[in-house]
Image (cartoon, rainbow, N blue to C red):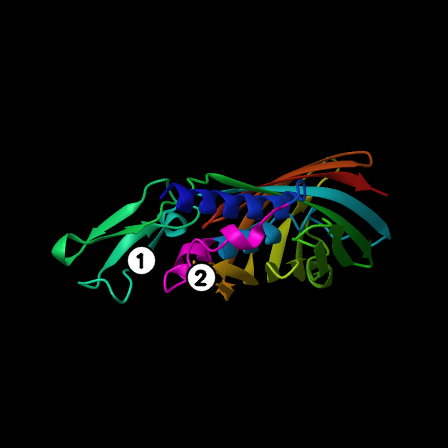
Amino acid sequence: MPHMKKRNLCLISFLCIILNVTNQMAQIDSYIGSYTGNNKNGFLQPVASVLTAAFNTGQVTHTKVDSNFRVYFHLIGTASFILSDKLKYFNATTPENFLPAQTVSAPTVLGPRRSTIVSGINGTAYTVPAGMGVQLLALALPQLALSYAGTELTARFFAYDTKDELSKINLLGVGLRHDIGRYFMKASTWSLSVGGMYQKTKAGTYMDLSTYSGAATVGQQQKHFNYFGQVGYQAGSLKGNYKHYNGESFESVNIDLKNDNPLFIGAGIGLNIGALQMQLQASGYEPIIGSFAIGLKF
């Protein structure tokens, strides 16, 4: 069990390092494979849901899309809070050669640090590994937006070569938002826009994350304050490939996970002081995401 816990700890470290791009990795192949069998997807699936929601929070940094030409540059930081049982637990099954066959509630990789022991015939037992008790996952991204004539083009880009086993980390995101309220809400102080964004993050062969989102944004933009609400759809796909040592040889293990929280609901409030902009945003519901943005408007 200590060895299994060490593997789980390294997997969480791996995910956090990719998001924050701060440290290098070593011996990746030897410790990602905490699960390689039937329970693998259930154990890892919440990571796909959390990353999808995190990447889709904080895209809108101001309520109204400008009619005049504007340039916005922001640093977006998000914190994903692991609160619900849906993110902490999954239904794990015992191996084929374990009798009687059983299904038990067990921690996901983000779940509590508590292993689950299943009793079998003839005094046998099967231990489902503990999670890592993760309460928070953080992410930081740069974002550039260009606005003109009620249309806004948004881009996110990051590239870094770790020069080790992880190889290159690349992030690319492209989004578009348009002020549709300009056609039928000209006399209103409220604004309504619709938009969407595609993002892709790759880290060698270990993680290939693609996210898609589309949402409607409604709110008010005042001189120094703005606030808005959002509702929309989001989808995410997390794929990866790594090698796991089974005691005799290395085997190739693939992951292909989807997010299971397609509904996107969010709200934000911002402060504008000259060229400086700051904003707080929250979205949910599984997981709950908090977002902070700081940047400049030109």
Kind of residue indicated by mark 1: Asn
Query: Residue placed farthest to the top in the image?
Result: 273
Circle 1 residue: 91
Circle 2 residue: 248
Q: Nearer the viewer, residue 246 or 179?
A: 246
From the viewer's perspective, tell me whether residue 297 is left or right of residue 212.
right
- State the residue at coordinates (19%, 63%): 99
Over which residues does the magenta segment extend?
Answer: 25-46
- State the residue at coordinates (75%, 56%): 154
- State the residue at coordinates (81%, 54%): 146
Q: Residues within 10 Å of mark 2 (few under 14, many from 20)?
A: few
Please say whether residue 27 is one of the residues in the magenta stretch. yes
From the viewer's perspective, tell me whether residue 268 is left or right of residue 169.
left
Q: Earlier in the sequence, mark 2 or mark 1?
A: 1
Cα gap from disc 2 to disc 1, whole angstroms: 29 Å
Query: Residue placed farthest to the front in the image?
Result: 248
Q: Quadrant of the N terminus?
A: top left
x and y percentages locating residue 116 in the rendered image: 28, 47
Kind of residue indicated by mark 2: Glu
> Considering only vertical position in the picture, is 127 above or below 277?
below
Q: Quadrant of residue 236?
A: bottom right
| Circle 2 or circle 1, nearest the eye | 2
Q: Nearer the viewer, residue 161 or 61?
A: 161
x and y percentages locating residue 174 in the rendered image: 73, 60
Residue 83 in sight: no
Judging from the image, what secondary structure is the residue with disc 2 in?
A: loop
